[in-house]
Amino acid sequence: MKTTMHWSGRLERLAVTALGWMVTALLWALALLNLLRTAFFQLEDPYIAWETVFYKADPVWPALQFTGALVLVVALWQRSGIGARISAPWRWIVAAAALAALGGVVWMQVSGQVQRHDSEMLIQAAQHWMEGDFSDFAEGGYLFCFPYQLGYALFLEGLFRLFGAGNVEAVRVVNSLCIGACVWLLSVLADKLMPKDSKNGTLTACLLLGAWCAVLFTGFAYGNVPGMTLAMAALYLQVTWQQGGHWGRMLASGVCIAFGVWLKSFSLIFLIAQVILLVLQAVRGRSWKPLAAVLAVLLLWQGLDKGSTAWMERRIGHEMNEGAPMILTLAMGMQNPWVGWRAEGWNNGYNLDIYSQVGYDAEEASALAREAIGWRLEEYRQDPATCLRFYYKKACSQWAEPTYQSLWINCRIGGMNEQESRLYQGKPARFLESGMELYQSAVWLSAAVYVTARRKKLDTTALAPGLVILGGFLFQMLWEGKSQYILPYFLLAVPYASAGLGLMAGWVQKLLKKPRDP
């Protein structure tokens, strides 16, 4: 007897189908963008200081050859039977994670990395607090304007109290461990979501060893690396809970995402994706438990945020400022760059300039930002071609920049010594950039192939990485642009890409086994 699906099941199926199509379309758009164009930095003065983004057209053939070579290697690996004989995939995953962490330690020794801009300001703030100096919260101070950086600044203060004031080496070690943890988390996530195609995560672990862009971030004293690590841990723990795990995993997921957002606010994209996944589960199963999980996650996030703010306010003896209104950053994300300076929608100082010009009056600053957004929207209405060109270049500058600023953030602005010049302006940098360019194109292309081929079979949890990537793309097209912000989303594409390579390798083997016509 044929049964009729409940309306909740049809609604959830419709949402998953729509999500699958959107993720597929986005992955193909990013694959084609990376095959045809590359954004890059020139690591020499004055372009380092200006953070200038350049563009070039790419020949498609080298990227296709590289992807084909990866498919062939995986096919030979599968044909040899090594994958089938792996009795403990976790050993491969742990080994890959350890190699990634070790790579970060090695990079620490050769990079000559110096902290600058926001990183330098946060290090100084943490050291000031250790001395009882809270001037960073005074009018015009760094934490006065950007209070959302409180979490990472407190994290730095804790590290410095343990290992010595200004001990950036401790930060680098933590980052190296985090990169290793990311390799492990993404591999076990692939094992949970696509065990057969990713060979229980071993293919994912091996492919992640090519993610040099992540390893080179180990010297960056900013919230990017620990924030994305905790966000990935939260996503993995939630997936395991949704697949039947213990409630403790969901609570641990809530703790991880709360600290992830606390360290880096862009982890909110992960949190929103987690909430969407839980709501879809509640609709499908007509259960209150996923909604209780949503409430728990939100309470943990807000509890940590409000609690740390209240504790800091007691330390400094007054309320913290709410900071520059977020709408200023939205307005900045719609602005053209100065000549020779950064890229479309990237930081041009507009948010801080306007906020200071109006005497740090949030309401007046917000009114000016709304006015600027209105002017820009009217310009787009009158000239849609300008709008298309702007957002195409904004997308290209972030999503087609294969280093994700991992080399740029390590460069010294002016006065490089001989070793640094050889590293960043010589053959090593060109080798790294070329390798990362081919790797990036192969990842997006293989991920697009996999999601296209398996779209009808991917359930809600299997689309979790794609949902985060989709949210990250939409957010970064509206917010302040920077290619370094794209790194977490790129790494989330690697599980799909590794499964895609495994899938294409299977196709190759079938073609080779197909008997020839007489």
Image: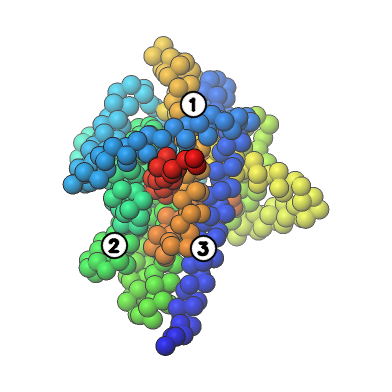
Tally the numbered discs. 3
C-alpha span from label 1 to label 2: 37 Å
Q: Is residue 102 visible?
A: yes
Please give the residue where the numbered disc 1 appears in the rendered image: 434
Q: Position of residue 238 (x, y in %)?
A: 32, 62
Element marked by disc 2: helix
**Which of the two labelled residues, at mark 1 and mark 2, occupies the earlier sequence position?**
2
Q: Position of residue 377 (x, y in %)?
A: 72, 55
Mark 1 is on which residue type?
Ser
Q: Could you say which is closer to the camera, residue 380 or residue 116?
A: 380
Q: Is residue 404 visible?
A: no
Q: Quadrant of the N terminus?
A: bottom left
Query: In the current view of this chain or complex, which residue is farthest to the top?
Result: 418
Color theme of the render = rainbow
Q: Could you say which is closer to the camera, residue 481 or residue 362?
A: 481
Which residue: 29% across, 44% down? 202
Q: Position of residue 27 (x, y in %)?
A: 53, 49
Please give the residue where the numbered disc 2 appears in the rendered image: 240
Mark 3 is on which residue type?
Leu
**Which of the two labelled residues, at mark 2 and mark 3, occupies the earlier sequence position?**
3
Q: Quadrant of residue 454?
A: bottom left
Please give the residue where the numbered disc 3 appears in the rendered image: 19
Q: Which mark is residue 518?
A: none
Mark 2 is on which residue type?
Thr
Q: Position of residue 119 (x, y in %)?
A: 41, 37
C-alpha span from label 3 to label 1: 33 Å
Which residue: 32% across, 27% down? 107
Quick one: label 1, few (<14), some, or many (20+) residues within 10 Å?
some
